[in-house]
Image (cartoon, rainbow, N blue to C red):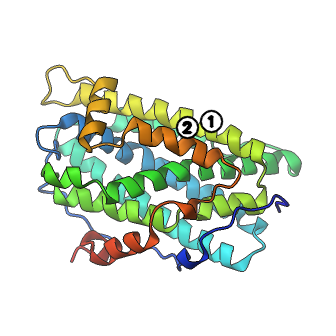
Amino acid sequence: MSNTPQPAPVVSEHIELKARNVSFAWEKTPLHWVPGDPFTGHMINVLHLLLPAGERWFVHVYKQVLPYIRDERLREDVIGFIGQEATHSAAHDDVLPHLKALGLDPTPYTAQVDWLFEKLLGDRTLPPGRAREWWLMERVATIAAIEHYTAFLGDWILNADALDKRGADAVMLDLLRWHGAEEVEHRSVAFDLFMHVDGGYRRRARTWATAFTALVFLWQRGARFFMANDPSLLDGRATFRAFLRAGRQGTLPTTAAMARSIPRYLSRTYHPSQEGSTAQAVAYLASSPGANGGR
């Protein structure tokens, strides 16, 4: 257990976490679900490629770390987190057959992502003791770093009014905002768990660098894959210029906002509860059609 002083959370923001019964109907969602802007849609579609394998990996790692938890409330939070992440994985997985039916087969890319999480970041044949525990703590720290960005994206999508103004598909927006709201709702769990079982600053900084580099690499590869294989585009390309333009228009996060998120996570006084709004997340979850069984 960590002896490192832990940054103070916003106690009033703590709520009980639970997996929700979600349902999304994809039959009427077009391939270019942001009208006239395939690039923005495909940049966000990368989530459907990364998250199923990634969140299954989160669940697998957290089941291994449960015996290390000595705080009962944190244990309950982690169990709630596991339930929510398993549901996220299944919901995004359900989008992939729809994309394939529209002529865009994601299988070649998802196979690469599966290899990353199952082989490169998966369990290793290590002797019991310090080596095995070291590898577990590395992965717990990596998840905390990734969750910093999923919470960042969750907060962004909840406030991305530009997508509504552009006429983005309502079902896709609901999926993204349901998921984003739950990421905001449980944004402190991964960090609190890391601080509880390890908390070392050097490990936090090192695994942040690894996670950030991997996310940027995988995201640009996924966007390029979608644009290049979109059957309706003659010369589909994913460019940094297009990303900057979408950020200025508000249909994607800005590079400045992402850059500002880096020193926040690396600050020794950082705590995820300092960012985003649980009240906003819970309010969206109460009104979301998909988060209430597709009502």
Amino acid beneath label 2: Phe
The answer to whether residue 22 is above or below residue 103 is: below
Which sits in the foreground, 35 or 269? 269
Q: Would residue 184 be found to the left or right of residue 222 on screen?
A: right
Q: Would residue 151 be found to the left or right of residue 223 on screen?
A: right
Which x, y percent locates residue 45? 30, 43
Which x, y percent locates residue 92? 35, 54
What is the number of the mark on residue 212? 2
Q: Quadrant of the N terminus?
A: bottom right
Q: Is residue 105 visible?
A: no
Amino acid beneath label 1: Ala
The answer to whether residue 11 is above or below residue 270 is: below
What is the number of the mark on residue 209? 1
Q: Is residue 123 visible?
A: yes
Which x, y percent locates residue 206? 70, 38
The answer to whether residue 268 is above or below residue 232 is: below
Q: Residue at x 43, y 66 (%)?
A: 182
Which sits in the foreground, 153 or 279? 279
